[in-house]
Image (tube, helix red, strand yellow):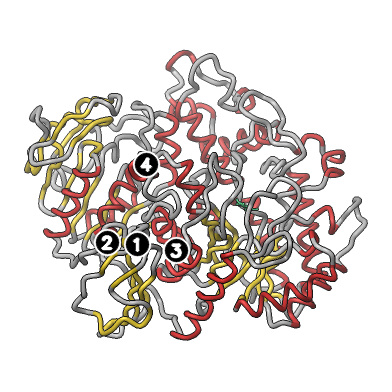
Amino acid sequence: MISPSIGVCYYPEQWPSEWWEDDARQMAEVGIKYVRIGEFAWSRFEPKPGQLDFSWLIESMDTLGRHGLKVIVGTPTATPPRWMLTKYPDMLAVDKDGRPRGFGSRRHYCFSHLGFRKECARITQLIVDAVGQHPALAGWQTDNEYGCHGTVLSYSDSALQGYRAWLKARYGTVEALNAAWGNVFWSMDYADFDEIDLPSLTVTEPNPIASLDFRRFSSDQVAEFNKVQFDVLKAARPDLPVIHNSMCRFTGYDHFKLAETLDVMSWDSYPLGHLDGAPEPQDLKTPYFRQGDPDSSGMHHDLYRAVGRGRWWIMELQPGPVNWADFNPDPLPGMARLWAWEAFAHGAEVVSYFRWRQAPFAQEQMHAGLTRPDREPAPAYFEAKQVAEEIAQLKFDGKPGKARVAVVFDYQSEWAWEIQPQAKGFSHLQHVRNCYVPLRKRGIEVDFLSPATSDFSGYDLVIIPALFAWNEALRTAIADFDGHLLIGPRSGSKTEDFSIPAALGPDLPRNLLDAKVIRIDASNPIHKVSVKGGGNVGHWRERLETNAEIVIEDEENFPVLIAQGRLNYLAASGDRALMQRIIDHLIADADIPTLELPAGVRCRTRGKWRIYFNYGDQPATLNHAADERAYVLGNADMPAAGVTVAELATGG
Ligand code: GAL
């Protein structure tokens, strides 16, 4: 673990080398400790095949190192140079309509292309040879944002060959595949694995299990691609962390699987850009357009903390307006500080701003940095400096403790419900969020769990929001758990082979939950049905046959929440009011302590500190919490975008 530190992303190759010394000096003045470089620089490492130039990389690392800065070197595999395409014209990913994607931006490769994978191993080894022992080197980043710009799925010939081999390894015989896939339907039987095509260009929808297996295969390709670089980097420097940076609301591959070949997980946080493009209602977007959604960053921090098995960074943090959303507002003053504090509070080791200086050229010229194109400081420069000073002054450190509530996050369920939404827009992530937000509004901390978890002990409440299919681990965890459980709509409604289970969903043993989903009402979310006692259901409503206790029902007398002992099953998609009511009911039942937070304020404890963030654009006043000794940064009266740190009486 690294004590909380500030970082920055820097592109020495984009600036005259005479500027590097000043840049490094200023970075050190800001209090920056980590600098990520190199991740897009392949054409400057290897301008022509085999013609190498690492001198500038070494020189820039020398310069940064002279100022006490530690360097994370990125492998440049997200931007293969133009000559690579001449060498491997078929290395481009192919879209669903069969069109190869073009050169001229980035991420123009197919994960399954074995020739390109070899090139990645080669350039990684060359970088290791050049700077692997450099004294400023502190770690590696593999590639950049796997899957960004819709690049996980590729319908190339390499992918086709890989998919067939993957299917053969999974099913053994084509007869077994036919049976598992239900290929008796529509005469889809195959006589050989070589007859199977990728699930695109079919006349109407492909078999959902073919699509899901393609998503599973494609996710595995990302993990295998990463492993190639991980192996090279670890062989050279087993002591240095290998990191990858993921994204917001991004579920294209199974991150838990990727993280098997990573030491540290990281993600890139752009709260305003994310909110602008998020499928969230206007009544959230309007009040927070300069601050970001008060629960989105927190949810991703918690998720990536789970993915990184406790070790995670923010590799890129928004420093000002970005360039890539439909609208790119200027953050409220103070937010670049608040976002960093929030990440540290959730356990980040390093928070690194993107980028040191705004580039006056190319695609991202409208994207702010800590400094402006004229080399003068931009507002976030001072906010980053303030954070660095504050964490140093407080000696802020410690671990985020185990939460009392956990949410199971399953990437496969994301894919399954995208493939077969049944109600347009039904998503696993949205159901995760519907449970997460009401908890956070009560000051309750949340851990995420991988679906491979077989033991829920230590938690008071575990939530499984909208799980596609049970696995043995989860069945064991549920059977052995004596805390409260909330199992959400659609959970257990399919088998791993994407069929309806013989016992129908939620497919739990009767002694745990005596209930069967016998029919689904999947309607346009504009049709809402009110629930007795408050809130609405809509979009997804299950008709149940059950002997369990009916805790909440709707105005049409259909059960909404049922309970058998401590196991609760939610049979519908609820609106915000209903979800708050259900979560409040469960936290009262499970006796989980809450905090009274002003609207727009969230908090998180780490070690002996509790950190409050005011996402509101108006001042807010905190209620004194009994377990706090004193405010050590800020106080109970929080300005808009303010941060207050309380020291806990118990020592955390
Ligand atoms: C990230 C990416 C960076 C940069 C940034 C702009 O997605 O990793 O390279 O493009 O967005 O906000």
Q: Residue at x 53, y 70 (%)?
A: 383
- Give how far apart the Cα atoms at labels 1 and 4 are: 17 Å
- Quadrant of res 399: bottom left
Reading the image, the residue beneath label 1 is 447
Callout 2 touching callout 3 (CB < 8 Å):
no
Q: Which mark is residue 428?
A: 4
Image-based side of 372 in relation to 549, left or right: right
Callout 1 touching callout 3 (CB < 8 Å):
yes
- Give how far apart the Cα atoms at labels 1 and 3 are: 8 Å
Reading the image, the residue beneath label 3 is 305
- The disc, 4 or 2, on the residue closer to the chain's N-terminal end is 2
How far across and how far down the image is residue 625, in percent?
Answer: 21, 75
Above-or-below relation of 533 to 341:
above
Amino acid, disc 3: Arg
- Give how far apart the Cα atoms at labels 2 and 3 are: 15 Å
For the C terminus, the image quarter is: bottom left
- The disc, 1 or 4, on the residue closer to the chain's N-terminal end is 4
Q: Which mark is residue 405?
A: 2
